Amino acid sequence: MTNPRLPTPRRHQRTAVAIDVTVNGVLSFVEGRIADLSEGGARIDGVSLPARSRCEIHYGGQLVYAVVMWSEVDRMGVRFPYELTHGPLYNALDRARTAAMVDPARIFHSQRPVTFGRRGLD
């Protein structure tokens, strides 16, 4: 038996991103930024629509339908009725996940000079 007060675990891994989008509410187009994205939903900063309202997210020529699950003054969380499986927004999610898997130490070591001091520069 599960406790109804505990949140259910997420089905998809959330990934931090910074993707500028246009959100189409009932009467307006608003610019926002997706700060957190998964195949099942997103957190959008800079936009606030009423909870349970429906909206469209426009990005890279793609239209993604969403339902507002929660809303605060300057951000909201949306759920996608149809999971992301392809298109520009899914590709941006895939790129962000790939970039997050790169070990920062590898980047540092790959850019580190092989020689020490001025002797190696001659």
Image (cartoon, rainbow, N blue to C red):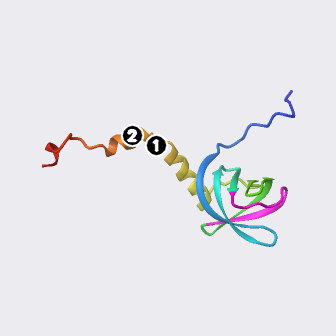
Q: Nearer the viewer, residue 105 or 94?
A: 105
For numbered disc 1, what is the local secondary structure? loop
> Dividing the picture into quarters, in which one does residue 27 lie?
bottom right
Q: Residues within 10 Å of mark 2 (few under 14, many from 20)?
A: few
Task: Name, please, the residue furthest toward the top.
Answer: 1
For numbered disc 2, what is the local secondary structure? helix
Residue 40 shows up from this direction: yes
State the image coordinates of residue 19 (x, y, percent, origin top left).
Answer: 60, 59
When the figure is inspected, residue 100 is found, relative to residue 86, above or below; the finding is: above
What residue is disc 1 on? 102
> Dividing the picture into quarters, in which one does residue 110 lie?
top left
Which three-letter amino acid code belongs to the residue tagged 2? Arg
Q: Residue at left 37%, top 42%?
A: 108
Q: Nearer the viewer, residue 122 or 13?
A: 122
Q: Residue at left 79%, top 61%?
A: 49
Any magenta on residue 80?
no
State the image coordinates of residue 1 (x, y, percent, origin top left).
Answer: 86, 27
State the image coordinates of residue 85 (x, y, percent, origin top left).
Answer: 64, 54
Q: Residues in magenta?
A: 45-59
Q: Residues within 10 Å of mark 1 (few under 14, many from 20)?
A: few
What residue is disc 2 on? 106
Q: Residue at left 16%, top 45%?
A: 118
Any magenta on residue 55?
yes
Residues at marks 1 and 2 touching, judged by CB atoms closer than 8 Å: yes
